[in-house]
Each structure stands twice: as C-alpha cells, then as structure tokens.
Amino acid sequence: MAKAMIAGLVNTHQIEVLGKDMVKLRALNDAFGGKLSLGLLQEGVDVTGKTLLLCVKPHALGAVSSYVQGEAHGLISVLAGTSLKALQEAFTCKHLIRAMPNLAAAHGASMTLLTGDNDFRETSEAILKSIGKTHWLGTEKEFDIAMALTGSGPAFLALVAEALCDGVVREGLKREDATFLARGLFEGFAPLLQANHPALIKEAVMSPGGVTAAGLGALEDCKARSAFMLAIKKTYEKTLK
C-alpha cells in the first residue's frame, strides 16, 4: 500500500521515506526515478512540525513510535484496525487522521476513507486527493465498516472478474479474449455506477425471461448476494480484533 500511495503522490509532494533497511529504501527510490528523500528509522528521528503518513503493519506501531521524537504537525495513519486512541498514545502530534486508501492509489484512482480531527480534514483531504477521491466519515465505527467495502473491495471485485473469465473460458472462449473483455466490462461499468443505482443497472440489462435473467437466477440460487454480504461482515469483524 505504501508503494501504491507513493506512486500517486510522488509527482505532487515532497516525500521523505523512513525505513530500517537502506538497501530496500534505495531500491524503492530507484523505482521512482530518485525523487524520494531517504532516511533510516532509528532512535531520535525528529518529526517536529512534519506531516507523517504512517504505512506500517499494525503490530509495528509501538516499535516505530519508539524511534521518533518531537511533536508532529499531523499524522495520517493507514493502519487497519488501529484506533485514534491507540495512535494518540503512540505519537505526539497536533492532529490525527485515520485513512484507508486502496491499491488503485497507484493509478490515481483510490477511493480513500478519512476520519479523525476535523481541524486537519481539509489538509489531509488535499494530500490524499492526489491519489484519487476521498470520503470523510464522522465516526470510527462508520470508518471501520466502510473499510470493508473500499479497502478490501478490490480483492472481492478481482474474484468476480476472475470467476467471470473462468466461466467464459469453460464455455470455449480464449483466455486472452476473456481477460480483454473483462477489463473493458469493468472500465465501462464505473460510469454506469456513477450515474445509476445498481438495481437500475440490473433492471436495464435484464429482459423478462432473457439470458441475463437466467444468469442472475443462477447467482441467486448459489446465494451470491448473501456471500458478498457475509464477506463484508467478516472483514469488518476482523478489523475489530
């Protein structure tokens, strides 16, 4: 996720990346044409007045915070399941934001969730709009629920795309044709969804007794709708653990 976000931000912001392995940091910098500033994450790193974008594994929160000193201006955390309270206990900063982008950030097309300090909302949204769209939520509970859709959603949609491709390949279509058509399908679906409720899109395609109705009937028989709703539920519950 950090690499995807850097790809979206590197041309519009000055980015300093801190890590514990300088070899990996240099390789990352090379991948972005040497546009990054690099620094070792070690005891005594001064973050006074800086805006931090925290992209580490949640279990590493305590270790990372032990290396930094000073009061940061703002902290934007993308750590799943790590509350504002936990971040406040780990870091000294004026403003705290939780954010959840997705992998589309690398293409400037992330749907990024935000919640936290309203006084830092405008600044954090301006930063994260460099990687796509943003959506502010008023509570952490709403944030954690929505994260199951926008954060994990690309994996769920990837499964749909893969299954649709496998289906037409099973019926005799070449794999390369299936993949090309699936990409075009998803690309064309985005503006449809922007302009219409999902139910209206479905109704527009499904003729009485037609081929789409037969396919949708099969999906309902297999409880596809319930399966996706359960996926959201399990993803949300995992966030809380």
Image (cartoon, rainbow, N blue to C red):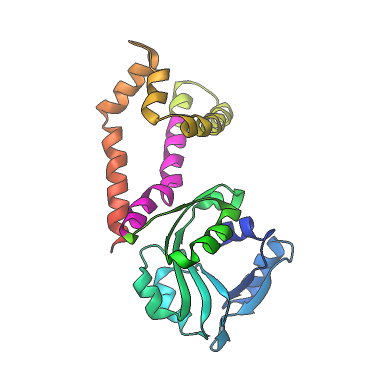
Q: Is residue 103 above or below residue 178?
A: below
Q: Position of residue 59 (x, y in %)?
A: 39, 72
In the image shown, does 39 or 196 lie closer to the viewer?
196
In the image shown, does 93 or 221 lie closer to the viewer?
93
- Indicate yes or no whether the magenta region holds residue 175: no
Left or right, 74 with respect to 80, comes to right
Quarter of the rendering containing residue 28: bottom right
Q: Is residue 103 above or below residue 61?
A: above
Left or right, 108 with respect to 236, comes to right
What's the residue at 52%, 61% (across, down)? Answer: 122
Q: Position of residue 192 (x, y in %)?
A: 49, 29
Magenta segment boundaries in residue numbering: 141-165
Q: Is residue 79 above or below residue 176?
A: below
- Residue at the extreme right of the image, as rendered: 33
What's the residue at 30%, 33% (across, down)? Answer: 224
Residue 239 seen by the camera: yes
- Residue at the extreme front of the image, as rendered: 119
